Image (cartoon, rainbow, N blue to C red):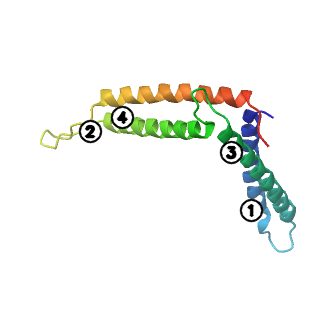
Amino acid sequence: MKLAEALLLRSEYQTQLESLEERISSNLKIQEGDTPTEDPKELLQRAEALSGELCTLVQRINRTNHALTLEGGETLSDALARRDMLRTRRQMLSRLIQTANQRDYRLTHSEVRMVLTLDLGALQREMDRLSKEFRELDTRIQGLNWTCDLLD
């Protein structure tokens, strides 16, 4: 199995676990004398079994991420952490730019006038740089995911 397939399977397992939890919750309490539409004990057993499979899969993914390296020697684990940091910084700059671009509507000329304390052009250029770096790194990560086998 390729690493990318394992990542897709991990997502599927997580979705299935959420669904099982919802179904268990829906059948957890019933009116006295009624029967649940599904057996919550069976659903709970399925959720526990799936949790075990997910745990094993995540452990294998983590081992693989630690063992693989991108060109340049950076481990996949480190690249993933850097990609997350790039995403976080880019999102923060985007929110700051949106906040700065909100119009201040004054009712009269005597109200306080607001001025920007940061250079929006510089913020936008930095956001563009981070976006490009994120995109390039993500492409390298995705390429590695589809070419490398999942470790045991």
Q: Which residue is at a point 48% across and 28% down the rendered structure image?
A: 131
Quarter of the view holding residue 8? top right
| Quadrant in which the C terminus appears | top right
Side of 129 where 57 appears, left or right? right
Determine the residue located farthest toward the bottom in the rendered image: 32
Q: Give the amino acid type for the residue marked by disc 4 in the picture.
A: Ile
Q: Gap between marks 2 and 4, in whole Å? A: 14 Å
The one nearer the camera, 57 or 31, is 57
Q: Gap between marks 4 and 1, in whole Å? A: 42 Å
Which of pointers 1 and 3 indicates the residue nearer the eye?
3
Q: Give the amino acid type for the residue marked by disc 3 in the picture.
A: Asn
Which residue corresponds to mark 1? 25
Q: Is there a contact, CB below 8 Å, between mark 2 and mark 3?
A: no
The picture places residue 38, in percent across and down from the top left corner, at 86, 59
Q: Gap between marks 1 and 3, in whole Å? A: 31 Å
N-term-proximal mark, 2 vs 3: 3
Q: Which residue is at a point 67% across and 35% down the rendered structure image?
A: 68
Which residue corresponds to mark 3? 62
Which residue corresponds to mark 4? 97
Q: Gap between marks 3 and 4, in whole Å? A: 36 Å
Q: Secondary structure at mark 1?
A: helix
Q: Gap between marks 2 and 3, in whole Å? A: 48 Å
Which of pointers 2 and 3 indicates the residue nearer the eye?
3
Q: Is there a contact, CB below 8 Å, between mark 2 and mark 4?
A: no
Q: Which residue is at a point 80% across and 57% down the rendered structure image?
A: 47
Q: Give the amino acid type for the residue marked by disc 2 in the picture.
A: Asp
Q: Secondary structure at mark 3?
A: helix
Q: Is there a contact, CB below 8 Å, between mark 4 and mark 1?
A: no
Which residue corresponds to mark 2? 104
The picture places residue 52, in percent across and down from the top left corner, at 79, 55
N-term-proximal mark, 1 vs 2: 1
